[in-house]
């Protein structure tokens, strides 16, 4: 068993916000524009409308996923094939399910995390998918950063996760700390905590939402079998970081595309 109390006493925790509600302006002023990771333990408990019992509703599908997570077999037929594009990046410890773009309108998330791609393009290749992920107990995700410096949110439907979060400027000295180097969660924790640069820790439970800006690296340990949804996004709080990344590593076509997304985003979303 992982000693959670010992972890909490050893590592500093990221900001935990217990506001009951959160407006877009509040989020941007306190966390978004400042690029500060934060765990919301109350405000986003109704991130998605979970009242429906429709077979195209994420709540319905999460019930089916609990059966898969419970027996940890992942060999049963997938329900609701009309909801998902495909099953991707599946391993012996987790599976990803990408929600079809056409279904996103039925699963509206908070406007705080709106993705400007959604209102600009009809091409599914350019849309960051809403990901449903189920992970086995005691599994690990390696140290990683958000794609193209975009922001990312994680919402746990059921389960228990621990994140180890580093500012991006530390990557040169902690890049060897990946879960592929370790066989157990405790080995990963020992490897991280023995490093000179200690990460911040975030413990996430069901009903809580974590925001991680594009300027951070993070590794994840799943203490219990976990069902979550997550998504990358670009909007007014991080468009400049995304554009800087594309300017440095993208093609001319990618640069032109992201400039059009940003211009369209400001035209249609900023009052």
Image: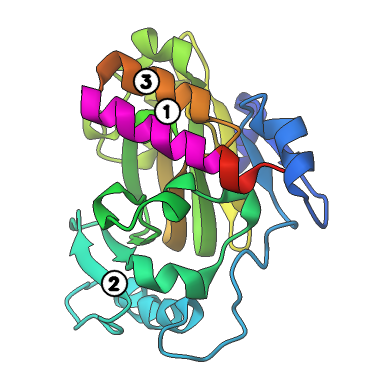
- Residue 80 is situated, as x and y percent measured from the top left of the image, at 30, 84
**Secondary structure of the residue carrying numbered label 3:** helix
Q: Contact (CB < 8 A) between labels 1 and 2?
A: no
Q: CA distance from mark 3 to mark 2?
A: 29 Å
Q: Residues within 10 Å of mark 3 (few under 14, many from 20)?
A: some
Pointer 1 and pointer 3: residues touching (CB < 8 Å)? Answer: yes
Mark 3, residue position: 245
Magenta span dominant secondary structure = helix
Please indicate whether residue 244 sits to the left or right of residue 40 in the image.
left
Circle 2 residue: 84
Q: State the image coordinates of residue 59 (x, y, percent, origin top left).
A: 50, 79
- Residue 54: assigned label: none
Depth order, front residue of 205/230? 230
Q: CA distance from mark 1 to mark 2?
A: 26 Å
**N-term-proximal mark, 1 vs 2:** 2
Say whether residue 91 is left or right of residue 177: left
The alpha-carbon separation of the residues under discs 1 and 3 comes to: 7 Å
**Mark 2 secondary-structure assignment:** strand
- First to last magenta residue range: 251-265
Which mark's residue is nearer the viewer, 3 or 2? 3
Q: Nearer the viewer, residue 30 or 177?
A: 30
Q: Residue at horizontal 35%, vertical 56%?
A: 129
Residue at the spot 79% in from the left edge and 41% down from the top edge: 26
Mark 3 and 2 residues: CB-CB less than 8 Å, in contact?
no
| Residue beneath disc 1 | 149
> Looking at the image, which residue is at 19% across and 58% down?
90
Dot 3 or dot 2, earlier in sequence: 2
């Amino acid at each position: 068993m992982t000693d959670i109390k010992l972890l909490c006493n050893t590592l500093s925790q990221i900001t935990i916000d217990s506001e009951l509600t959160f407006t877009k302006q509040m989020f941007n002023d306190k966390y978004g524009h400042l690029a500060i990771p934060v765990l919301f333990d109350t405000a986003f408990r109704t991130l998605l409308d979970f009242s429906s019992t429709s077979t195209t509703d994420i709540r319905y599908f999460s019930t089916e996923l609990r059966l898969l997570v419970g027996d940890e077999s992942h060999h049963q037929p997938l329900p609701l094939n009309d909801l998902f594009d495909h099953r991707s990046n599946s391993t012996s410890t987790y599976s990803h399910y990408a929600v079809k773009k056409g279904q996103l309108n039925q699963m509206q998330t908070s406007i705080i995390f709106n993705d400007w791609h959604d209102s600009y393009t009809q091409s599914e290749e350019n849309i960051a998918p809403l990901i449903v992920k189920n992970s086995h107990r005691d599994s690990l995700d390696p140290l990683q950063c958000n794609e193209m410096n975009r922001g990312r949110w994680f919402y746990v439907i059921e389960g228990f996760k621990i994140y180890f979060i580093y500012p991006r400027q530390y990557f040169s000295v902690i890049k060897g700390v990946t879960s592929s180097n370790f066989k157990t969660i405790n080995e990963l924790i020992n490897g991280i905590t023995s490093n000179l640069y200690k990460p911040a820790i975030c413990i996430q439970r069901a009903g809580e939402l974590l925001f991680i800006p594009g300027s951070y690296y993070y590794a994840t340990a799943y203490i219990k079998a976990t069902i979550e949804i997550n998504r990358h996004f670009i909007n007014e709080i991080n468009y400049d970081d995304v554009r800087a990344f594309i300017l440095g590593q993208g093609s001319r076509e990618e640069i032109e595309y992201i400039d059009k997304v940003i211009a369209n985003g400001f035209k249609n979303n900023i009052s």
